[in-house]
Amino acid sequence: MTQTTASTSDRVKLPFSFDVAKMKEEVKALGLDAFIYYNVIPLRAPAHQVDASLPLPPPAADYADGTWTDWLDTPQLEASPYLTEVVNTFRAHTRVTLVRVLRLAAGNVVQEHTDPTLGLEIERSVIRLTIPILQNEQVDFFLNGKPVAMQPGECWYLRLTDPHKVVNAGSSDRINLTIDMEPNAWIRSIILDADAKN
């Protein structure tokens, strides 16, 4: 993939705010079973994973690159009206691909890594917006070695092509909602405008 001319900070707080209590309630209703280390609840997934009657898409070199398949809402999203409203905030304006609830258990770490297609500067990229739902004071999301001060209900663009990791040194789970989408002119403008104001 090649670089485009767009350039942003590695972290940008966007002008969206979501109801934390409603998100917590709906995530809890999805059935928070006991889990070890890391848990993913898909809310939008590749179409063949939601509807087994659909044909398999061709293999994908990068799962996060949303162009390789069609995407459908899962039963979990269909049962969650407020989370659907959150997703629709973006789906009304651009193509939304992968949507997940990500849970990191207390006392665990997501090791440092990069996501090659998840940056606004990458041609034909998909970008990921992060909305924290449940945090504790000992959760740190490090991007390029520096913590990102995300708070529940906020919405952030993070340049995940850069090195990042998550440390949950607290005694409770960390839960985020992530929404992947095609970076069309609408969302690009919002990110660039918010970045210019920071």
Image (cartoon, rainbow, N blue to C red):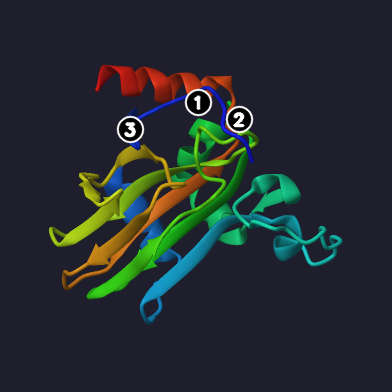
Alpha carbon distance from label 1 to label 3: 12 Å
Mark nearer the N terminus (3 vs 2): 3
The picture places residue 186, in percent across and down from the top left corner, at 53, 21
Q: What residue does disc 1 label?
A: 187
Q: Mark 2 packing: few (<14 Cα in 10 Å), some, or many (20+)?
A: some
Callout 3 amino acid: Val
Above or below residue 133? Residue 94 is: above
Q: Secondary structure at mark 2?
A: loop
* Pointer 2 with pointer 1, Cβ within 8 A: yes
Q: What residue does disc 2 label?
A: 94
Callout 1 amino acid: Ile
Callout 2 amino acid: Thr
Q: Secondary structure at mark 3?
A: strand
**Relative depth, front residue between 85 and 54:** 54
What residue do we see at 27% from left, 54% from top? 141
The number of numbered badges drawn on the structure is 3
